[in-house]
Image (cartoon, coloured by chain):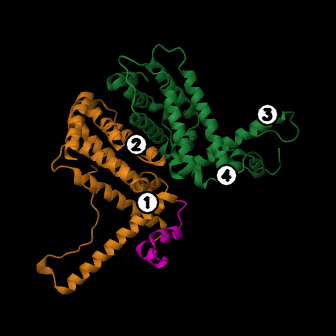
Amino acid sequence: MARGDGEGEGRKLHRLPPGRHGLSREFVTRNQQERLIAGSVAAVAEKGFRDATVTDVSAAAGVSRRTFYAYFQTKEECFLATFELLEEHLLAAVAEAAASRPSWTAEVRARVAALLDLLKENPDLVRFAVVAPPAAGGAVMERNRRLLERLVEALVADAPEGRGYSQPTEVERHAIEGALAAVLADKVSDGEQRLAEAAPELVELVLVPFVGRRRAATAAAKA
Amino acid sequence: MFGARRYPRPVTQLPPALSSGSVQEGRISQAAREDERRRQVLAALTDVFAKRGYQAATVENLIAGAKISMGGFYKFFEGKEDCFVQVYERVVELALQRMRAELPAGADWATQAIVGTRALVEFAAERPLAAKVVVLEAQTGGAEALRRYVATVREAAAFLRRGREEGMLGERLPANFEDSTASGLVWLFQTRLARGGIDDPDELHPQIAKVVLEPYLGPARAEGLLRAADDEHAASK
């Protein structure tokens, strides 16, 4: 690893030992890239997309700016790569959670729980993906919109059709996305995180357009 | 629909007993001229902010778009941020005026909700640039703009919350239900405006009104009221 790496303060991540460590180039590459991604989450969570610099991201990742530029040409490129990886992880976790549940509403409950479990581990993910984008506008905000669309699609995947179920309108779908974003953002405001308590609220707001308020509230009470 | 929101207006006329005749009239017309000028400038600036985005727009872009001098710009505004805040307030006021104009006097909550959301959807469809300034650019427009934006969304949520007085259904709703609904609806406008605008206001409005009414009135009553309001609206057109 290059000498003279910036010291990340506070949020410093695990570093590889210096010198010959017998780790494959591929491993080092992946490790550095993942650290840069984690670094961008931490830096953006703290400063926002506009104010977080390449230096901030590199410092939080515990690598040099030179290393940063070996992987990304601009900070925007790094941020979008972070969105990609984050989305992949969130969607995979949500998809896996639904396996072998007795009912669709139980599936949705499990998916919401899996999502919150993942976000609870690192509330900065919410700050990066939900809280910070609106102030950035532009490509970042559009990426955030796409992430929320896919996330809601994943949460309500395989919704049954027919008796007792309705299909949400476009407005209802977007309303779920916006409400989901608002609830998550609210649960990480003022430096604290209260993500665990969001489960009933999220289950209810996701389910309402499909099963009506009464059944959604019943399912939420079990969340 | 956002309650009684008042903006300071310049006093343009004194009661006759207090007026001192011709001198006063001269002032009135000058004040009116300045008002009109200000209105034109703010309208031009709205387009510049919407097209370039708050962050990218420079003071040079703004004075070019509004066809004013640098000196004129700083006479009207303290700087870019202050300029944006004034543009923002003007658009909010225009949207509110539109809602007030369409609302029958003494309308109940449900009518306010239906007519108010229709006025908003039509406003956003007809004036996508102005709408963009309020729902998209306000979030990137600095601390004061963000504060006002958040306050506007809260007012919308407060209006929705009054729906709880309409019946028993509201009692079952989570405490911050209206905040989520308001955020969801703003999100919808943001998504539509960021992706090109609203070209189907007549299809969009009933869906929005449904999201607003249903939690408090239930599906059947919401649909009935909505249909009646739509018929009335169609007849008046």
The majority secondary structure of the magenta stretch comes to: helix
Would you name the residue on which mark 4 appears?
A56
Judging depth in this view, the residue of A59 and B109 nearest the camera is: B109
Picture residue at 43% right of the left edge, 20% below the top: A105
Q: Where is residue A211 in the image (x, y as percent from the top left)?
A: 37, 23
Judge whether residue B142 is colored magenta: no
Q: Where is residue A196 in the image (x, y as percent from the top left)?
A: 49, 31
Looking at the rendered structure, the kind of residue marked 2 is Ser
Q: Is residue B68 above or below residue B3?
A: below
Mark nearest the camera among 2 and 1 is 2
Closer to the N terminus: mark 4 or mark 3? 3
Looking at the rendered structure, the secondary structure element under dot 4 is helix
Q: State how far apart marks 2 and 1 are (Cα).
A: 19 Å
Looking at the rendered structure, the secondary structure element under dot 3 is helix
Judge whether residue B60 is colored magenta: yes
Q: State how far apart marks 2 and 3 are (Cα).
A: 43 Å
Residue at mark 2 shares a chain with residue at mark 3: no
Q: What stretch is highlighted in magenta?
A: B55-77
Using the image, tell me which numbered label, if any, was put on residue B183. 2
Judging depth in this view, the residue of B39 and A147 nearest the camera is: B39
Looking at the rendered structure, the kind of residue marked 1 is Glu
Chain A visual colour: green
Q: Mark 3 lies on which chain?
A: A
Would you name the residue on which mark 1 appears?
B144
A172 relative position to A14: left or right: left
Q: In which quarter of the image is residue B85?
A: bottom left
Chain B visual colour: orange
Mark nearest the camera among 2 and 3 is 2
Residue at mark 4 shares a chain with residue at mark 3: yes
Residue at mark 1 shares a chain with residue at mark 4: no
Would you name the residue on which mark 3 appears?
A27
* Residue B219 visible in the shown view: yes
